[in-house]
Image (cartoon, rainbow, N blue to C red):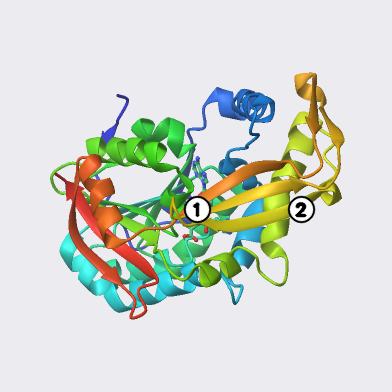
Amino acid sequence: MDVERAAAAPPTENASPAEQIQIEDRLQDSAKDGSDLRRDVLEGLTAEFKGLPPKYFYDELGSELFEQITELPEYYPTRVERSILAEQAEAIVAAADPQCLIELGSGSASKTRVLLSAMHEAGSLHTYVPVDISEEITRATAHELISEYPELRVHGVLCDFENDLERLPAWGQRRMFAFLGGTIGNFDRPKRIAFLSRIASLLGPMDTLLLGTDLVKDPERLEAAYNDSAGVTSRFNKNVLSVLNRELDADFDLDAFEHLAFYDDENERIDIRLLSLADQLVHVRALGLEVPFAEGEEMRTELSCKFTRQSIERSYAESGLELVELWTDPEQQFALSLARGA
Ligand code: SAH
Ligand code: AVI
């Protein structure tokens, strides 16, 4: 395991932006030269039930569309998670006592500010480590944060957390890993347990994990959140086809596919797909691939699993983690939970 230990650098009052921000590019060559994308797309488009991994949504436009989703009236998770953080940040910081906050899939870190402010109030704000696959949003976020928190060091890491978790540098003693927004729900169950187990093996005795999970609820409310009336989620979903057109010289016609999102009650998850509106042949020239889609055929682009307190505890138990505390909102729509190594 390639884990570097570095002491959390004490912040200085007059640090320049260049000293305060460091963005480390740890994306592997296979991500940079497109071979991961080629492998995943070849596998996904030649399978009997076609599918694409959700991480390819997040080019610059995809990150921007996700930001728009978080502001939609139907998309409650961001608002509710922020409200729980606003209520409980002090309690979370008191329970975890972190010096360093490492956020996986940080994006715009819009809710993270609540935690950073609570760490600031507790006098323990040293280092923030945003970890994301999307370079543009990570750089922009780092610059915004240092203007808001002059004492903060931002050590961003660009990487694919699925591939590179063990290659993250490890700063100082009391680290809190945060995985917010319900992004853990975008893994299916086996991947979730594997990923949480990997986090568990990185946690030292003083480290914690703060996990955001969307909760099982009325299917109508859930389905509305993924079928907004303004059509932003549809554009976000189809953006993966634009990524393939650009990166792999493909010729997907975005108008020939329809966004689908429905609640799968048995598996407690929203299933997000693209439905082919016609019999069509798509060319992915960079792969020398011709992909037939039948009219009515569905391709999975994302899963968004929903949880109960029991399923959160079970996921932790199966991953070598132990629940410390769980916070939710009055309507029990979303949960934040703090875990330690078992
Ligand atoms: N945490 C933010 C953003 C969630 S959107 C929130 O709660 O609102 C999911 C984020 O995870 C995006 O910023 C996306 O770029 C990032 N992401 C998705 N898959 C990733 C991967 N495999 N490795 C690193 N980052 C990833
Ligand atoms: C990032 N992730 C938690 C979002 C979700 O709700 O599963 C992604 C998303 N997909 C469609 N809308 C939002």
**Which quadrant, please, contains the C terminus?**
top left
Q: Secondary structure at mark 1?
A: strand
Dot 2: element: strand
| Among the two numbered marks 2 and 1 on one chain, the one whose residue lies closer to the N terminus | 2
User: Relative to 136, does residue 161 appear above or below in the rendering?
Assistant: above
User: Label 1: which residue?
Assistant: 304
- Is 304 placed left or right of 34 in the picture? left
Asked if the residue at label 1 sits under 8 Å from ligand 2, the reply is yes
Residue 268 at x, y percent in the picture: 43, 55
- Residue at image x 58%, y 53%? 137
Which residue does the image show at 80% across and 18% down from the upper left?
288
Tag 2: residue type?
Glu
Tell me which amino acid carries mark 1: Ser
Which residue is under mark 2?
Answer: 258
Q: Residue at x 71, y 55 (%)?
A: 259
Per the model, the C-alpha gap separating discs 2 and 1 is 18 Å
Q: Horizontal and vertical percent for residue 136?
A: 61, 50
x and y percent of residue 159 in the render?
A: 49, 37
Q: Are marks 2 and 1 in contact (CB under 8 Å)?
A: no
